[in-house]
């Protein structure tokens, strides 16, 4: 069999999502952002919502998300994406409005906007990429950094008395009456990626049917910030992060 | 309320009614004295049941201004109102909106500062409003109403300017105009724009409309290539120049033969107008120039008067903010005096008259 025989449309088992363009990604090797971007592109296309989507990107590594997915995007100020999304959804109720935020953006500087938008039951989806670190600014401590973990601003390891405790904002969100669906997933294996896709699709469907606010956290690796190879980072996440942040649906109404 | 009929309203209430009537799509605000009546009036009027206008009490002024970023960025007519400490919190968002060229209306019913200050009227946010306020080189279009009627009229005017220039616009009012009651004719009720109208007027808007047939619309203030960023800044500056050339508004009163021209905006301009009337009855040739747009500032109009009048006196409820712009416009041709009261102390016409006489005596004109 020649190469030409194999490269036939009927043999196609996988392709780049239609809504993903050819712009080269700025993400580091081993980073989880690209995988989640791909899932979002697939779901929007499968739901035929390209013309109805407003994405809100954060300040953080995903600040350039708008370069890669062919939908309309607003790039919000650091932490303010849920407020931006609130107005977009209220003013365009038939649109798919989602935010895409890191842990610093969502759980630290934007904690107020996150909690209030979720608790107002805004019909949006908040996608929360938790890599336990500030990736973009070079690996500083995040609100989600586990105790003991070393970062550039806690170089001797995070200590409760010095730095306070890691914030589990997703568990908090599950207790809010305004949230309809709260889930924590990861993308470190094919099975996990499939589960994350299901969670994101469920959140988007909820938001489109007006079911209240939706939060999908994706536990993510940051090889560069964690100073580990992609394989080591995945293992480290399984051993250290998963026991701090429980995987699975926390709330589904 | 019927069209073309006088009603008695507070300045704050007039803003709320005018917003609904001019087809505003969304209001996002956080309570603060002396402007809480605006959100309260809207909540009572329930425009979401009539025009479909969204009214939302935000969790903070930071959230409110970012709701404007989203609402205006998606092409809707959106506004917020606040008072000085709240507007201080909005500066980051306004900077983002200016560079992304997002139209929206921000109303500041000023109170005295610094800090929590006082709930009494003040004009001490003039500089913040007219020279940017947040980070970076940018401008906000600023209108200064001097009556309840202008509170009502400037809502639509500000939206028109904001959309004409794709730029945030501000109504810089104060606690006097916000709280006082006057007769006012409200603008006629106009429908909100349809999705097709928005798509036509705002092809840049981030709302999904037409993606696939057009390229995605993206709004971002981030640009890591300094050469491109400079180009973007220069384009903005060019736009600001065109605004300065075409949107200056001011009112002159008895200036043609005036020995001394008072310059004041907003509530203080009304007090000065009264003082000018009193002075004229006493034979003193006083006049008044009232900037209506604080940015763009009526530089040429002031420069022209500076050539004619013997003195200029700027009166403000602050430590001397607009007077800097007046001095820059006058370029030393005429002495420019300043009279200011601060932190909720509203000057009386008598105080202004006494100051005018003092300065005219100095040059032996009385
Ligand atoms: C008001 C403001 N403060 C600080 C910053 C600097 N800053 C940029 S990204 C970032 C942290 C991002 O971390 P996270 O949200 O966890 O996302 P990640 O980069 O890890 O994906 C900070 C502090 C900023 N841009 N704006």
Image (spheres, rainbow, N blue to C red):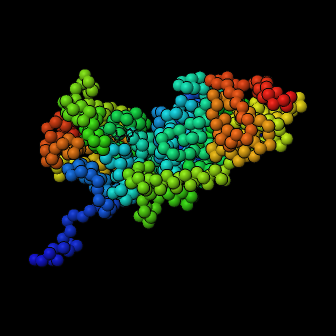
Q: Residue at x 37, y 45 (%)?
A: A58
Taking the view exactly as shown, the residue that stands out farthest to the left is A1
Q: Is residue A216 above or below residue A67?
A: above
Residue B126 in the image, given as x and y percentages of width and height: 61, 35
Q: Quadrant of residue B14?
A: top right
**Residue A247 spot, x, y in % from top left:** 21, 39
- Dividing the picture into quadrants, the one containing residue A119 is top left
**Vertical placement of A52 versus B37: above or below?**
below
Tell me, yes or no, if residue B205 can be seen here: no
Expressed as whole percent of the image width and height from the top left, the position of residue A33 reads 27, 49
Question: For this view, does B226 lie left or right of residue B192?
Answer: left
- Closer to the camera in the image, A217 or B119: B119
Residue B137 seen in this snapshot: yes
Say which residue appears at 39% left-offset and 41% top-offset: A78
Identify which residue is drawn at 55% across, 52% down.
Answer: B237
The residue lying at 19 percent from left, 37 percent from top is A241
Side of B184 where A136 appears, left or right: left
Which quadrant of the figure shows ligand 1? top left
């Amino acid at each position: 069999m020649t190469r030409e025989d194999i490269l036939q449309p009927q043999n196609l088992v996988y392709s780049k999502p239609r809504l993903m363009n050819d712009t080269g990604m700025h993400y580091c090797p081993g980073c989880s952002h690209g995988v989640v971007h791909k899932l979002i592109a697939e779901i929007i296309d499968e739901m035929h919502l390209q013309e109805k989507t407003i994405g809100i990107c954060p300040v953080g590594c995903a600040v350039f998300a708008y370069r890669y997915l062919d939908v309309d995007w607003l790039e919000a100020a650091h932490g303010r994406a849920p407020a931006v999304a609130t107005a977009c959804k209220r003013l365009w109720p038939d649109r798919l409005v989602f935010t895409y935020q890191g842990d610093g953006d969502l759980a630290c500087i934007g904690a107020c906007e996150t909690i209030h938008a979720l608790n107002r039951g805004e019909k949006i989806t908040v996608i929360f990429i938790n890599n336990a670190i500030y990736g973009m600014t070079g690996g500083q401590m995040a609100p989600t950094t586990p105790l003991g973990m070393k970062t550039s601003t806690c170089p001797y390891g995070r200590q409760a008395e010095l730095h306070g405790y890691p914030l589990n904002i997703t568990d908090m969100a599950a207790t809010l009456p305004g949230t309809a669906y709260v889930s924590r997933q990861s993308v470190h294996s094919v099975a996990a990626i499939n589960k994350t896709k299901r969670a994101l699709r469920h959140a988007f469907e909820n938001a489109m049917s007006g079911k209240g606010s939706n939060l999908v956290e994706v536990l993510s690796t940051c090889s560069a910030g964690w100073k580990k190879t992609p394989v080591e980072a995945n293992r480290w996440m399984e051993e250290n992060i998963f026991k701090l942040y429980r995987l699975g649906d926390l709330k589904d109404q | 309320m019927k069209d073309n009929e006088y009603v008695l309203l507070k300045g704050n209430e007039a803003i709320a009614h005018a917003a609904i009537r001019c087809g505003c799509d969304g209001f996002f605000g956080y309570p603060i004295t002396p402007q809480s009546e605006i959100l309260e009036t809207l909540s009572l009027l329930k425009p979401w049941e009539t025009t479909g206008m969204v009214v939302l009490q935000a969790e903070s002024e930071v959230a409110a201004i970012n709701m404007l970023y989203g609402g205006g960025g998606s092409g809707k007519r959106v506004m917020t109102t606040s008072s000085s400490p709240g507007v201080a919190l909005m500066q980051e968002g306004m900077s983002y909106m200016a560079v992304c060229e997002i139209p929206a209306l921000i109303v500041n019913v000023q109170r005295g500062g610094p800090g929590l200050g006082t709930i009494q009227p003040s004009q001490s946010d003039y500089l913040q409003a007219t020279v940017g306020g947040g980070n970076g080189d940018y401008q906000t279009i600023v209108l200064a109403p001097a009556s309840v009627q202008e509170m009502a009229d400037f809502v639509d005017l500000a939206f028109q300017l904001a959309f004409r220039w794709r730029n945030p616009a501000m109504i810089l009012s104060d606690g006097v105009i916000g709280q006082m009651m006057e007769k006012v004719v409200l603008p006629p009720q106009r429908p909100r724009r349809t999705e097709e109208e928005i798509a036509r007027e705002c092809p840049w808007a981030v709302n999904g409309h037409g993606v696939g047939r057009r390229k995605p619309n993206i709004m971002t203030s981030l640009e890591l290539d300094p050469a491109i960023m400079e180009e973007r800044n220069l384009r903005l500056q060019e736009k600001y120049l065109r605004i300065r050339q075409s949107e200056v508004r001011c009112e002159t009163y008895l200036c043609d033969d005036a020995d001394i021209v008072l310059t004041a905006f907003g509530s203080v301009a009304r007090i000065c107008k009264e003082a000018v009337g009193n002075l004229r009855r006493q034979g003193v040739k006083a006049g008044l120039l009232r900037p209506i747009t604080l940015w763009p500032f009526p530089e040429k109009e002031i420069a022209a008067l500076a050539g004619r009048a013997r003195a200029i006196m700027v009166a403000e409820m602050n430590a001397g903010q607009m007077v800097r712009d007046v001095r820059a416009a006058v370029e030393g041709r005429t002495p420019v005096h300043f009279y200011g009261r601060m932190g909720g102390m509203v000057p009386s016409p008598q105080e202004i008259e006494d100051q005018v006489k003092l300065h005219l005596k100095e040059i032996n004109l009385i």
